[in-house]
Amino acid sequence: MILNGRAVAEDMYEALTKRRALFERGIKLGIVVAAPSPVIESFVRIKTRAAAKLNIEMVRVNLPQDADTAAAIEVVKRLAQETDSVIVQLPLPKTLDTNAVLGAIPPEKDVDALNPTIPEDKHPVFAPVALAVVELLKRAGVQIAGKKAVVVGAGRLVGAPSAVLLRRLGARVSMFTLKEGSVEDLKDADIVVCGAGNPGLVKPEHIKKGVAMIDAGASESKGRVVGDADPACAEKASVITPVPGGVGPVAVAMIFRNLFDLLEKARS
């Protein structure tokens, strides 16, 4: 089964449109972009189209190439005052302190749940990509509790939050990174979540037949956005997501679900 993330997202937008109608005012979502790349611009376009679909104004600020951490923090703080929620599009240039910039997002306006100063169990919403991973597994009828899951990559956008959420749902989770775990761990996994951003990293010989594979490892290769899983993995997996068109659209929909959750919490 190749999971169509775009179709899942469209189904979610039907419910989100009904929730949007409950807010009888304009809603603004701020986004800070630095060092644009084809992959980053692809994600920003998807978010912008989704915002328009829900009658939400996207307020984009492009950081100058010479912006330092202090300037980036000021932009985030200003956007937080002017909008209902703020996204800092990652990755940021190495010249910027990513933790400091993300730490400037008020928790009540952090739709990506990336502020590192807030404990994971204290944040009002959960990371959109991790939510998308779980949503896709559930829609495919994949049982999570009691299953062995291997998360490839430990980044703050995909790997780390996906591992936390899968553990909360009862999976036995291990990580595979350049510093932790082994590719051999993949051979016994019932669920594999890819988030390393390394094109073609996971090969068919690394996985068992019937595995559920969620590929959220989008990166650029030869001018195209590709995943961590070799396309041939589809021949062995019982469930797999394409890149693009898999996790990405669902994660974007989760951003807006988080936005409405935050607005409702603030209102109550």
Image (spheres, helix red, strand yellow):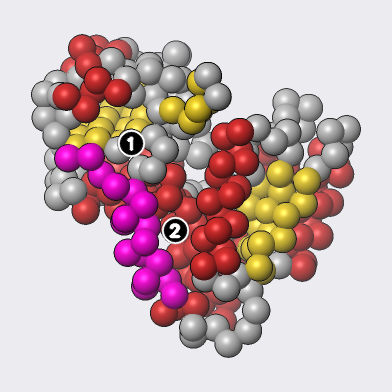
Which three-letter amino acid code belongs to the residue tagged 2?
Answer: Ala
Q: Start and end of the magenta stretch?
A: 1-17
First reached walking from the N terminus: tag 1 or tag 2: 1
- Report the residue at 52% width, 71% height from top: 54
Residue lying farthest to the left in this orientation: 209
In this rendering, position of residue 196 left or right of residue 26: left
**Residue 185 pos. (x, y %):** 24, 17
Q: Which residue is mark 2?
A: 253
- Specify few, some or many for label 1: CA neighbours under 10 Å numbering under 14, 14-19, or 20 or more: many
Q: Nearer the viewer, residue 81 or 201?
A: 201
Q: Is residue 112 visible?
A: no
Q: Callout 1: helix, strand or loop? A: loop
Q: Nearer the viewer, residue 232 or 208?
A: 232
**Residue 5 pos. (x, y %):** 34, 49
Dividing the picture into quadrants, the one containing residue 179 is top left
Label placed on residue 242: 1
**Residue 222 pos. (x, y %):** 53, 19
Residue 46 in the image: above or below residue 15:
above
Which three-letter amino acid code belongs to the residue tagged 1?
Answer: Pro
Q: Is residue 83 visible?
A: yes
Residue lying farthest to the front in this orientation: 223
